[in-house]
């Protein structure tokens, strides 16, 4: 049995409230045409290579930096509870591999409370990822998501 405190030591979390209804935030996370608009840090372009949104389904995205360098992200969906939870394995090559990403959505009136967890295989790897800029990188991604949601709700 896994100790909850041990998991917490391997987890980095970001919490936000999006000024968009839960249905739109869910679509932004589950529909390839939305994902391509916000997935990746500021300045990146995202191309959807594979997207099978179902438990056991695989996803693979190519993210291109302004200078042309390409990064690949891929994973397998582990758990999906519409419109509240998405859990997936994830690799963000070459920076991060073998993590689990968890996205939780909660309706808050016309807004959506959001929690993103990244669970690492070890506490040391978690600390290394935090030092490499986890919060800046994912913060930039979720800023892009927020901008996409605002544009999509107009």
Image (cartoon, grey):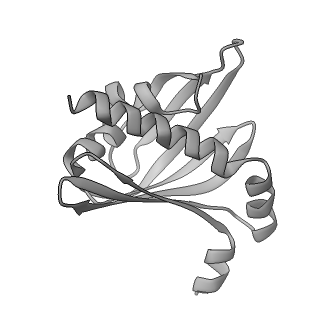
Q: How many marks?
A: 0
Relative vertical location of residue 108 with respect to residue 65 in this rendering, above or below: below
Q: Position of residue 141 (x, y in %)?
A: 53, 39
Q: Position of residue 150 (x, y in %)?
A: 30, 34
In the rendered structure, the answer to whether residue 93 lies left or right of residue 53 reads: right
Which quarter of the figure is the N terminus placed in? Answer: bottom right
Q: Position of residue 34 (x, y in %)?
A: 34, 29
Relative vertical location of residue 6 with respect to residue 44 in this rendering, above or below: below
In the rendered structure, the answer to whether residue 6 lies left or right of residue 107 reads: right
Q: Quadrant of residue 41?
A: top right
In the rendered structure, the answer to whether residue 5 lies left or right of residue 31 reads: right
Residue found 78% across the figure and 63% down from its top: 127
Q: Position of residue 7 (x, y in %)?
A: 62, 76
Relative vertical location of residue 150 with respect to residue 2 in this rendering, above or below: above
Residue found 48% across the figure and 39% down from its top: 143
Is any atom of residue 2 visible in this view?
no
Is any atom of residue 9 visible in this view?
yes
Residue found 66% across the figure and 53% down from its top: 98
Residue found 32% across the figure and 38% down from its top: 28
Which quarter of the figure is the C terminus placed in? Answer: top left
Tell which of 99 and 135 is nearer to you: 135
Q: Quadrant of residue 118?
A: bottom right
């Amino acid at each position: 049995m896994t100790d909850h405190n041990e998991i917490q030591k391997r987890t980095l979390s970001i919490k936000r409230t999006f000024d968009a209804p839960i249905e739109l935030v869910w679509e932004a996370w589950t529909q390839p045409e939305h994902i391509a608009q916000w997935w990746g840090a500021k300045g990146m372009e995202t191309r959807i290579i594979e997207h099978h949104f179902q438990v056991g389904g695989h996803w693979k995205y190519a993210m291109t930096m302004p200078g042309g360098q390409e990064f690949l992200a891929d994973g397998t969906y582990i758990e999906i509870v519409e419109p509240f939870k998405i859990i997936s394995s994830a690799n963000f090559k070459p920076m991060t591999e073998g993590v689990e990403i968890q996205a939780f959505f909660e309706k808050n009136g016309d807004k959506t409370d959001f929690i993103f967890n990244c669970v690492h295989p070890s506490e040391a790897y978690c600390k290394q990822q935090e030092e490499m800029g986890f919060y800046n990188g994912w913060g930039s991604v979720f800023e892009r998501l927020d901008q996409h949601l605002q544009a999509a709700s107009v």
